[in-house]
Structures are given as structure tokens and as C-alpha cells.
Image (cartoon, grey):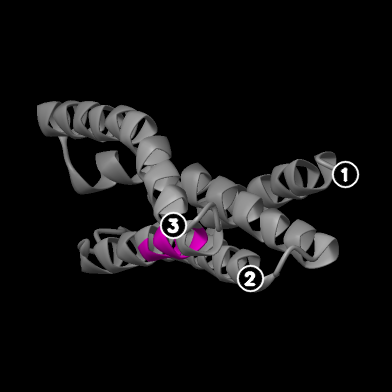
């Protein structure tokens, strides 16, 4: 059963990345990936321990996160140039590593504060996904005509 979300993510990531490369568009692909995760997190919060709904929600979360990541990492170099791009990527990695340390602790604290109920923790995570969408919307759209796009086969 655990292969369902990951198998769906692999297929979706390849299709998502190919479409993003073909169109040269990154920001909206990343935003839509976050929105898919957001929907999955809200569904998981509402699933009320239903195995079928939980599996659907977990699949949406996994697919959304995978599709967000596959397009996100091409963005720093399109927004920043030269040493600023290197510094930006280093900053993203630093914050991501910090989030890997603080995130589980924070979610554990939210669960403990709610008597072990996961619902509030899923809503907090959905809030972070929404914050990511807002941040991505505030980024400049510096897409040039199909920069980085994969040419169509002849």
C-alpha cells in the first residue's frame, strides 16, 4: 500500500517536469504542486481515520511535494545570477536543513498540545503549504522565451 503514493509521485514527477521543461514555465508548476499538497493535507485532516481517504490524501501530498520539488530547484538560477545564485541555493539548503530539525519538533508539540490528535498538525502543515504558495506568487516571473525548455523532437 505504501508504494501507491510513491509510484504515483514518480509518474507525476516525470510528466510534470517534462511539461515544465517544454513550456519553460516554473513558477506556476511549483505553485500547483504546493496546492496539490495543500488539498491532500486538508483532506488528511478531514479524513477522520478513514483508510481510503487517508491513502488518497497521502497520495496527493506525496505527488504535490514531488512535483513542487522537481520544478522549484530550477528557479533560483533563473531568478538570481552568478554568485547570488550560489548564495541563494546555499541559503535554501540551510533553511531546509533547519526545517528538517525544527519541523518534526514543532509538529510533535502541536500534537501534544491537542492530546495526540493529528488534525491540527495537518492544518499547520497546510498553512505552511499556503505560505509557500503566497511566497511563490510574490516572486518575479523572469521566464524568458523557453529558457531551459527541451526542444520538441523533429
Q: Which residues are magenta?
A: 122-127
Q: Indicate whether 73 appears above or below 18.
A: above
Give the secondary structure at mark 2. Answer: helix
What whole-number distance in Å separates the C-alpha atoms at marks 2 and 3?
Answer: 12 Å
Residue 63 shows in the view: yes
The secondary structure that dominates the magenta segment is helix
User: In this figure, which residue is indicated by the disc labeled 1?
Assistant: 1
Residue 33: percent from left, percent from top: 52, 60
Query: Label 2: which residue?
Result: 43
Residue 13 placement (x, y as % from top left): 64, 47
**What is the x, y in percent for residue 31?**
43, 64
- What secondary structure is marked by label 3? helix
Residue occupied by mark 3: 125
Q: Are marks 2 and 3 in contact (CB under 8 Å)?
A: no
Residues packed near mark 1 inside 10 Å, few (<14), some (14 to 19) or many (20 plus): few
Q: Secondary structure at mark 1?
A: loop
Viewer-proximal residue among 26 and 42: 42
Which residue is pictured at 22% across the width and 26% down the height?
Answer: 90
Which mark is first along the chain, 1 or 2? 1
Amino acid at each position: 500500500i505504501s508504494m501507491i503514493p510513491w509510484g504515483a509521485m514518480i509518474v507525476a514527477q516525470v510528466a510534470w517536469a517534462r511539461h515544465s521543461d517544454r513550456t519553460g514555465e516554473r513558477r506556476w508548476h511549483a505553485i500547483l504542486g504546493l496546492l496539490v499538497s495543500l488539498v491532500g493535507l486538508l483532506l488528511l485532516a478531514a479524513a477522520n481515520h478513514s483508510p481510503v481517504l487517508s491513502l488518497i490524501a497521502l497520495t496527493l501530498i506525496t505527488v504535490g511535494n514531488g512535483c513542487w520539488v522537481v520544478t522549484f530547484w530550477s528557479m533560483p538560477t533563473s531568478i538570481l545570477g552568478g554568485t547570488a545564485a550560489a548564495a541563494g541555493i546555499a541559503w535554501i539548503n540551510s533553511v531546509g536543513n533547519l526545517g528538517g530539525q525544527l519541523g518534526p519538533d514543532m509538529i510533535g508539540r502541536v500534537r501534544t498540545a491537542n492530546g495526540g490528535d493529528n488534525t491540527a498538525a495537518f492544518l499547520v502543515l497546510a498553512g505552511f503549504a499556503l505560505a509557500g504558495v503566497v511566497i511563490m506568487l510574490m516572486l518575479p516571473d523572469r521566464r524568458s522565451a523557453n529558457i531551459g525548455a527541451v526542444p520538441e523532437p523533429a
